[in-house]
Image (cartoon, rainbow, N blue to C red):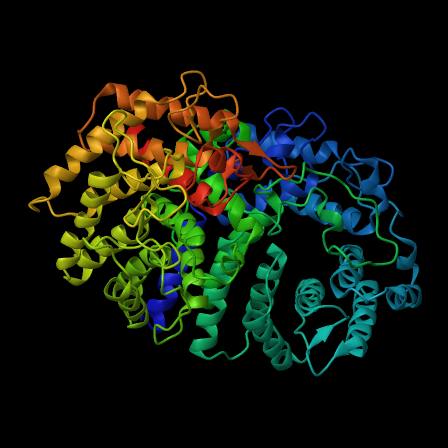
Amino acid sequence: MLKGKEALREHLSEMDGLLERLPAWMAGQYDPESGGFYYARSSRLSANRRPDIESTAQALNMLERLGLLEAMPAAVKVNMIHFFKSRQEPESGYFYDHDPCMREDEVMVSRALGYSANALRKLGAAPTHPLPDAAKQAPFYMRSPEAYLKWLQSIDLSNSWRGCDRLCCSHVYVKQLPEPERSAFAQTAFRFFAETQDRDSGLWGEGALYERISGTFKLHTFYSGFQTPMPHTEQLAASILLGLRHEEASDMCYIRNPVHLLSYIRPAMKEEDLRLVLRTTLYNMSRLLRSDGGISRELAHSPSAPNVAQVKNGASYPGMPKPVHLSEGLVEGDMNAATQALLIRSLCYAMADETPPKLVQRADEFYDGMMERRTLFMLHPTIATPMEWARAACDSLMSVYLPEELPPASRWHYHQGVFLCGMEMLWEAERDQRYDAYIKRYVDRLVDDHGNFDFARDELDAIQAGLLLFRLDERNGGSKYRAAADKLRYLFHTLNRTSEGGFWHKDKYAYNMWLDGLYMGGVFALKYAKLYGDTGLRDMALHQERLMRRYMRDERTGLLYHAWDESRRMPWADRETGCSPEFWGRSLGWYGLALAQFLDELPEEHAGRNELASSLADFAEALARYQDAESGLWYQVVDKGYLADNWLETSCTCLFVYTLAKAYKFGLVGEACLNAAKRGYEGLTRVLQFDEKGRFILPDICIGTSAGDYENYVTRPTSQNDLHGVGAFVMASVEMQALLG
């Protein structure tokens, strides 16, 4: 494991990878007509939203941090200057957006004033009209230090974040005062802050720990504006580190504010504490990265009205303003989070005493794209590529579940394993570190430092999630992942078998082999053999496939029955063949997935490779024959699409698309199978849905199913976003992207 400077540099490098698409996302929010920037992509696509002051000022700050401000073309500069000047009210000197509710929010009014004045200064311009103080339009409490103190004392700090934000909004007016009035007002504020600070924690106000840290961050802007050190910084630093260790950062501000405070107060930190700050910050940011390339303000979604986002669901604060909606509140990136992300990056590099590399290499190319309004990342319904679909699927589930919350929660289970294997394929294609962190957290919450974990010891299904262990072992070292893999490997010694060595699918299904089992255990066996040299596992896995082909394959259709009972005791078992009576879609999908991944893992010179390749080719061609011509999907009972109560099922379609694409990629089948894969994938994209937050939904997934008769399959309930269905979709998406380029 890396230590010292190398560990810090690795965290910083991963953060750069996390943000590499952020500049293009930001450029996509530019509106050449107004010169402003939209808050989010849904704002840009909505007839009810316009570019706003705060988002435009934040975009300007991002351009500055990216080193692009000096290279700004004259046309863009003129447009941005016009944007801010057009928002100033001549009579009062304030800057307002079009939504009248903004005028009722004292914090928004103050922020818009500060943002606009600073933005015009950065752009080499000045406000057209006098600012509020010069225009005698400052708030009532600016009449005297006594009135100011009375107003400060009136602010409710039951929610530290909101309360301190209100306190801090006076900063912009105090800064406008001439001396000696300015110093008198500033000292009034600092005396009040000193009296109300909790000296044990170094924090202000009440609420949850991250709310208090965020409120304290708001007050830090007052201190920094007057270049005044904050009091009780040792206690404050301890509170921040406590939050990083134990609190969930569900809001981007909960990620930025601790880092910003630590950067300002500069406490003496141990190397392990600095690593904690960078590691935790990186992980928390990774959870907010969205498929459009942006960063979202909140974990669940991007709040449509950020002016009221400080008071979370279930909480209250007196006199909250009306929401000022800037977007549609979808699962998407937003400008508020984006500007914080780049600031966090700068602060983390500074804390590590490292120089950040450029995220944008060519300013001219960046601005060309921005001025042409080149939209690289659109709203979900217009996602253009399979890889973007894969990201949308993973990001949507990540926004709903922590890794350990994936259903069934806190269990070692193939549902999570299939989804995370799909995510791992996406990570391998894109090297997006948030996916790596998410997978690792799932495993680390279940596997202890000695490789111990709780798993079912009487079924093949328990082995599938072990596929996640191999890359973790390669990338992270140590013995825990190998030790856990060894435990699963030795299940092959203890699982019950048929008379010819075929694994029972589960102990409760005595003498039953199911197609599902070839993927659940076989791919793990081949990967284990490849990584750790246990080559006997290859012949064992291939033997399972041969048994399935021998006893479960139907010569007429080329398909395989779901299950086979050597004892002929199951109610569904044919008394002559022992097979179940139907060709169930997802079981065939598991079989195809296994064949394809077996070929990935088998050495080119292995004696069983040609036989396996022939099996995959025959199977792929059989699948193509049963594709529904109209929809491109496949039926729950694959060969009986003509029956009225049969229905089109998405998870098997995903697995069939993957199988067909892999068979074509291996050169085993021709254009007919390629076209079937394309039609299948296009059919899937037509049935995909999105919830009210813009999150991806894969519908019509058959729930887990045992072998049975026709009625058993067609009467099974369906679900949305079952993990094994979404995982199969991500696998199909990544494979189709590789195929189509």
Residue drawn at x 20%, y 51% is: 541
Left or right of 475 on screen, residue 536: left
Residue drawn at x 69%, y 47% is: 115
Asked if one can make out residue 21 in the rendered structure from this viewpoint, the answer is no
Q: Determine the image quadrant of residue 58.
A: top right
* Image position, residue 695 (x, y; %): 57, 40
Q: How many labels, in total?
A: 0
* Image position, residue 510 (x, y; %): 34, 55
Left or right of 472 on screen, residue 414: right
Asked if one can make out residue 46 in the rendered structure from this viewpoint, the answer is yes
Quarter of the picture holding the C terminus: top left
Residue drawn at x 17%, y 49% is: 543
Q: Determine the image quadrant of residue 89.
A: top right
Left or right of 416 on screen, residue 580: left
Q: 354 or 660, which lies in front?
A: 660
Residue furthest to the top: 630
Q: Reply above or below: 461 against 588.
A: below
* Image position, residue 706 (x, y; %): 43, 45
Q: Determine the image quadrant of residue 44.
A: top right
Residue furthest to the bottom: 200
Q: 590 or 76, which lies in front?
A: 590
* Image position, residue 378 (x, y; %): 52, 30
Q: Reply above or below: 476 against 306.
A: below
Residue drawn at x 83%, y 45% is: 322
Q: Reply above or below: 353 against 380.
A: below
Q: 407 or 312, which lies in front?
A: 407
Quarter of the picture holding the N terminus: bottom left
